[in-house]
Image: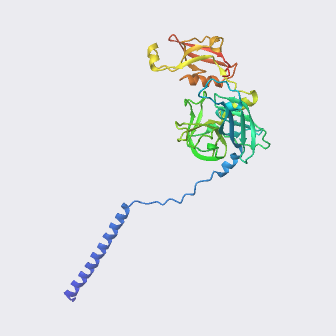
């Protein structure tokens, strides 16, 4: 017969072991629950350093030139402001710095009109330091473009991008000669495309960028990350005259159209309708009883011009040209300018509160 005291000790020992195991399991489960509530940290792989754009720059840099133009100005005598100049001392030479791009293997250089217009002499400095004199082949103040010709012996070849394919967010590089310090590269992105109504040129279709552009960059290249030229740097949005984060470039597709016309014709040929007008506003529309209408109110029709011959009258409101909606005067300018002399255009509008349509044959826009 088993001793009762030994049985009791046996049961108590195993009971203690069971309790201890139970406590261990509880602690383990609590630890697992705590771990499940902790954030799971995922360590990202180390990112590669940013790609270099040296290859892209090297493709285009030899085609980007520095421009120094010289403008003769009459020196005014405060005591004799109306005095007629009689000697060289009555004049001074004002230099103007800018940039340009060799756009054609024949040595043609494109730059901005405001860099070279009215210059008595133009010097071009290549990336290798060679200095040449340039001559103006043609100017187009309406787009602020100019084409120069030089006697470059070995013209670098540039790669041309399709600027119509430029997208907001694309990486771009601006290359030029800011402040005349020498060829400089800045980086940014395309901030906007098709930017117009800026008030800089008659015809505007800018690529907007935040790449730094400063005085002297005008006429330089805006390129993509492959080293293809996207546009010609033209202006900045600034009251101080220095870079504030908003810069504008003329798309290369528009540039090439102007350049090719200047090389072929010596000037740019655009369509002309022969009217003047003003933008409609709500006050005008309320006064004439046509609220909500978009269009341009015709204020003048040139004698013998295409508009007069087509029956357009002062007081007409143009709402569509070739079925394109007219929002303001700039729309009319841009649509007509894309045409060529002799092109037929269809005009829709409102005359004395009645709809009308007319067909006009475009003339050639007079040179200013």
**Can the viewer see residue 299?**
yes
Give x and y (percent) for residue 289: 45, 14
As drawn, which residue projects farthest toward the left? Answer: 4
Give x and y (percent) for residue 223: 64, 43
Q: Is residue 294 above or below residue 252?
A: above
Give x and y (percent) for residue 103: 72, 38
Q: Residue at x 20, y 89 (%)?
A: 3
Taking 5 as reference, is 366 left or right?
right
Of residues 105 and 218, the one drawn nearer to the viewer in this rendering: 218
Taking 134 as reference, is 308 left or right?
left
**Can the viewer see residue 72?**
no
As drawn, which residue projects farthest toward the right? Answer: 153
Q: Which residue is drawn at 34% across and 70% down?
A: 28
Q: Residue at x 55, y 13 (%)?
A: 316
Q: Quadrant of residue 359?
A: top right
Give x and y (percent) for residue 190: 57, 41
Q: In which quarter of the image is residue 254?
A: top right
Taking 44 as reference, is 146 left or right?
right
Q: Quadrant of the C terminus?
A: top right
Q: In this view, does 299 lie above or below 212?
A: above
Of residues 288 and 127, the one drawn nearer to the viewer in this rendering: 127
């Amino acid at each position: 017969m088993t001793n009762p005291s030994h049985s009791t000790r046996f049961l108590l020992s195993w009971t203690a072991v069971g309790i201890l195991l139970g406590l261990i399991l509880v602690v383990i489960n609590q630890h697992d629950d705590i771990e499940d509530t902790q954030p799971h940290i995922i360590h990202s792989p180390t990112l590669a350093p940013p790609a270099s754009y040296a290859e892209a720059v090297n493709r285009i840099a030899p085609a980007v030139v520095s421009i120094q133009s010289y403008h003769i100005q009459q020196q005014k005598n405060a005591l004799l402001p109306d005095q007629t100049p009689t000697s060289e001392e009555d004049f001074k030479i004002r230099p103007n710095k800018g940039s340009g791009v060799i756009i054609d293997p024949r040595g043609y250089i494109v730059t901005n009109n405001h860099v070279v217009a009215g210059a008595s002499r133009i010097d071009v400095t290549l990336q290798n330091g060679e200095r040449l004199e340039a001559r103006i082949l043609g100017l187009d103040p309406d787009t602020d473009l100019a084409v120069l010709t030089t006697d470059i012996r070995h013209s670098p070849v540039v790669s041309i991008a399709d600027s119509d394919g430029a997208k907001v967010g694309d990486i771009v590089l601006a290359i030029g000669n800011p402040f005349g310090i020498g060829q400089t590269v800045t980086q940014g992105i395309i901030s906007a495309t098709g930017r117009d109504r800026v008030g800089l040129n008659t015809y505007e279709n800018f690529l907007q960028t935040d790449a730094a552009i400063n005085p002297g960059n005008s006429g330089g290249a805006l390129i993509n990350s492959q080293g293809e030229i996207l546009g010609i740097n033209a202006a900045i949005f600034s009251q101080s005259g220095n870079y504030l984060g908003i810069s504008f470039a003329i798309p290369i597709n528009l540039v090439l159209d102007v350049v090719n016309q200047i090389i072929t014709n010596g000037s740019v040929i655009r369509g002309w309708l022969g009217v003047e007008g003003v933008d409609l506003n709500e006050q005008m529309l309320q006064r004439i009883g046509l609220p909500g209408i978009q269009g341009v109110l015709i204020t003048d029709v040139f004698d013998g011009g295409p508009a007069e011959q087509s029956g357009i009258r002062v007081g007409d409101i143009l709402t569509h040209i070739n079925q394109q909606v007219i929002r303001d005067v700039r729309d009319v300018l841009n649509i007509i300018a894309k045409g060529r002399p002799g092109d037929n255009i269809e005009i829709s509008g409102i005359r004395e509160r009645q709809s009308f349509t007319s067909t006009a044959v475009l003339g050639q826009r007079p040179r200013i």
